[in-house]
Image (cartoon, rainbow, N blue to C red):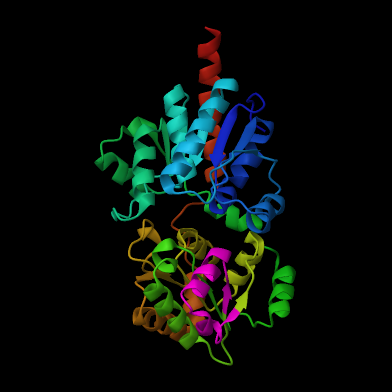
Amino acid sequence: MYPLPPRSVAIVLGTRPELVKLTDLVRLLGPAAHLVHTGQHYDDELSGRFLTELGLPEPTFLTGVGGQSRAVQISAALAQLDGLFAAEPPLAVVVQGDTNAALAGALAANARGIPLLHVEAGLRSHDRDMPEEHNRVLIDHISDVLCAATEDNRAGLLAEGVDDARIAVTGNTVVEAVRNQLPDADRRAALLDRYGLTADGYVLATVHRPENTDSPEALRAILTELGALATPGRPVLLPLHPRTRARIEAARLTHLLAPLTVSAPVGYGEFLALARHAALLVSDSGGIQEECTVLGRPLVVVRRSTERPEAMGDFAELVEPGPGIGRAARRRLAEGAEGLDRLAALPSPFGDGLASERIAGLLTAIGAREQLTAAA
């Protein structure tokens, strides 16, 4: 437990990956943590389950954000956060990653002169077509404390002119999230049995990014390649996000799901269990690029660009929608048990699992300084 007053650290988030990555920090801060959920991603089936499964306290929820355009999401959240911070000024504000919620939280803190700490600072895809790239650059340059996951992230920030005194290399909180949320061996075995899967004998896939789901051509290419990977002895399991399902139906591509084993969305622990025993992961997720390095599993990343180059090479390979998916997947699958053993023996490039503790320590120092300044 860290000696900060109750509700003195506002943790602003709006998506499920942020909930996952900030869970251990929230637990370490205890009553000092004030969770503020913008509602960027909120539904009972997914976000509600994540809050319950992760054991997080009930957040303060904002309204009118989810389902809106990027500009409306940021502006609606910013206006409500400004009112919240005026009524209940925190000693510090924490944001994570590169979401619209994170940018709104960062701008609100900056406008009120509240110390801002950015978890997972310094990531860059150098792809200006990604809204997240603009978000993360803006957040980094107005943050007071930048928690870089790796030395490469720190070097990139220094190259952009960020003062070294503002940067702390903490590691990535995903490492402890995976270690703490991965079900034990017995529960994983029971889960595989329920799905009719054999360890190391299936492919696990996810598709959700707009660059893939909003393009019927990209979506067709991805589903076609996934279907071609499925065999009677090696199913391809696809937990289907509601938004992706809607896009598939709108594009009249439902028939391409026939070779796949389609399931409803799964909770975080269940997903980690399935990923832990997959022969291969195929996904457009940023978080899975990190998680695969902790789980020791190979990944084909279906995207134009990545902000996580540390995962590429040993653990992951970047391909665009199309035949490259199948080629990369079959190369990885051909490595078999030897390839899986090799990955399992490698350390994650994202740290040692102590990132949340380091960040909590930084927040304690900020809180102590702010309280001394207020008392002076």
Vertical placement of residue 308 versus 355, above or below: below
- 138 vs 119, left or right, is left
Q: Is residue 376 visible?
A: yes
Q: Residue at the far top: name it.
A: 376
Residue at 62% across / 71% down in the picture? 274
Vertical placement of residue 196 versus 2, above or below: below
Vertical placement of residue 369 versus 157, above or below: above
- 325 vs 129, left or right, is right
Residue 169: horizontal and vertical position, in percent?
A: 42, 42
Residue 203: horizontal and vertical position, in percent?
A: 54, 79
Of residues 326 and 314, which is closer to you in this image? 326
Vertical placement of residue 100 versus 303, above or below: above
Q: Is residue 314 visible?
A: no
Range of magenta residues: 237-261
Magenta stretch: residue 45 in it? no
Residue at 43% across / 74% down in the picture? 219
Q: Residue at the far bottom: name it.
A: 232
Residue at 65% across / 39% down in the picture? 59
Magenta stretch: residue 256 in it? yes
